[in-house]
Amino acid sequence: MTPARAGLAAFAFATLAASAVPALGQGDPARGEPLYRPCQACHMIGEGAVHRVGPHLNGLVGRSIGAVPGYEFSEDLAAAGAEGAIWDEDTLDRFLEGPRAYFPGTRMVFRGIRSEEDRADLIAYLLDEGGAAEEGDTQGTEVALDPEIAAIVAIAGDVPYGEYLSSECTACHQPSGGGDIPSIRGLAPSAFIAGMVAYRNGTREHQVMNMVSRRLGDEEIAALAAYFATTE
Amino acid sequence: MSINRRVFLGTTGALVGSLAAPMIVRAQSAPRVVVVGGGSGGATAARYIARDGAGAVDVTLIEPQRIYQTCYFGNLYIGGFYDYDDLGHGYGTLASSYGINVVHDWAVGVDRDAKTVSLASGATVPYDHLVLSPGIDFVEDSVPGWSVSAQGRMPHAYKGGTQVQLLREQIAAMPEGGTFAMVAPPNPYRCPPGPYERVSMVAHYLRENNPTAKILIVDPKESFSKQGLFEDGWNRHYSGMITRIGPDMGGSTYEVDPAAMTVTIDGVVENVDVCNVIPGQRAGQIAFAAGITDGNWAPVSAYDMTSRIDPSITVLGDAAAQGAMPKSGFSANSQAKVAANAILAALTGSRAFPARYSNTCWSLLDTDDGVKVGATYEASDEGIVSVDSFVSQVDETAEVRAATYRESLDWYGAITTDMFS
């Protein structure tokens, strides 16, 4: 994110904070529970939650955007956090309405939730299940990586092999990203690996990606992650 | 070679500047790859070889068309879901960014002993390795009564471009309550779900514009790709509009009369208003001219897509007899990447990696109702074999179907980027 865009994003937070927003606690966490199900493909929340494809969501409300330790955020989110932006009910509401409209650089693959009520319910669920950030702790708590992901992260990926393997990906993943099929260039290795592991073991469902990942060994996922980390 | 040159330089003293000498060596020794056909196989292969070869290989791409019109998504144009102009792609970036020598001409002959390709203009292009990716041509007399000279009245619309425009115009001009007929091809043919996606898109157009019109499919095959998904979609969206006559009902005994605009099925004459004849298919003509075919197709090694008849020639895409992969643009693109790696390894000593292929074919049934089928593949001595596969399910939610359609739009953007940018 350019300094100008980061500044504008911070400006947007400031103006929004001053405008009328739904009061805290308007949502219904019970209604939010089913709305959270698609999020589970990438995120964990509650006791024992660790980073997967996306960061864990414990203590989300009140913590800095793009700052929880142990997770490599996109530049856009990290820059917003560095400007002092916080996940509160208002910023979460805007992000969940259209993640890429709000943070064009986000790697979160999610089209958004149109209904304002649904968003409030989901945020209420996130607060209920994951709690709020502790007073004065806007950075969140560091957590360990999932062991299966950590084992692949520890492999030194063979970049040329990864580049060859990546030609299977580029048939569908455009460098610039599409409307539904995201760009995978420049992904942090841990996020790439977490994503492929989730597809390979079926916790994240997609017919093509489940099939593609099923024939990738740990060495091949590490090679792909190492290659994509070198691309922009 | 390098010793000789050093000796030569030594005897001639400082006559030649030391910087110039390696240039001469390279210009003389850079291996020449000639690619015939600038579609999904050929354009991808040329781009990957030139890009990854980084100047170590000279790449020439021979393609008669200045703008490549993809065959895939042509059905979406017929249905009104895609603009014709968005199906066209130029070769400018391949020439300017990758240094590929793009020659707009027809390759008409291959001299395998001299290792040259002859062009319709009369020129001859030498190669060290040749890639043939010519797509399909039609088997003569495959549909009794039809020949290429009749394609103005009964279009095949199966190679993209003007034929697809013509077919759409004919459908738009159909009389109220008229009949659209399709003569579906026998196996094997390009894009297995293609004819049936076309029927879906024609039905979509007619439902919106000519709802009492009928669609008649004459089909010599017992069954076809994604049949359950298509028939379920036709029942839900176009109930009563589509009739398919398979071989059990006489669908393998037919002839057409382009002058009279009739289709005769098992002796019964049907008057039709539009007739889309998709004939039986074979490898593009240049594969026959090169003498590397066996039957209708060019057999290849599954390990690197080289011809089983001449290892200096690689055959990609629809023209190749490779085993289990369907003939599709996705397959050709996948094969081209394996071939590019193997060709570069053979010519420059770069690393060779094991062959691995994949394919996914999307089809649109109606607005926001997309389905897909796909598989991963690997090489064996017998040919390319399937490792794993999936197919859309009949009971999927509307949201899944809409997402599948949107993914197909992204795929189209990605594969054309992978070929041309």
Image (cartoon, grey):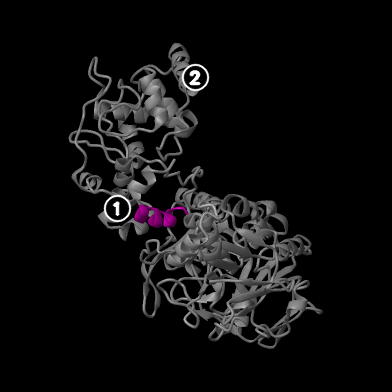
Q: Does residue B303 belong to the magenta stretch?
A: no
Instruction: Report whether A197 appears left or right of B265.
Output: left
Q: Quadrant of residue B113?
A: bottom right
What amino acid type is highlighted by mark number 1?
Answer: Gly
Residue at 36% over, 54% down: A160
The one of A94 and B51 positioned closer to us in this rendering: B51
* Figure check: B276 above or below A142: below
Inter-mark Cα distance, 2 to 1: 39 Å
- Magenta span: helix, strand or loop, mainly? helix
Q: Give the magenta range.
A: A160-170
Residue B243, image x and y in percent? Answer: 61, 72
- The reply to whether residue A151 is visible in this rendering is yes
Which residue carries the number 1 mark?
A: A202
For mark 1, give the secondary structure.
Answer: loop
Residue A84, image x and y in percent? Answer: 37, 17
Disc ID at residue A8: 2
* Figure check: A162 above or below A55: below
Residue at 58% over, 49% down: B97
Which callout, 2 or 1, points to the residue nearer the camera?
2
* Figure check: A133 above or below B30: above
Which mark sits nearer the N-terminus, 2 or 1?
Answer: 2
Residue A191, image x and y in percent? Answer: 32, 41
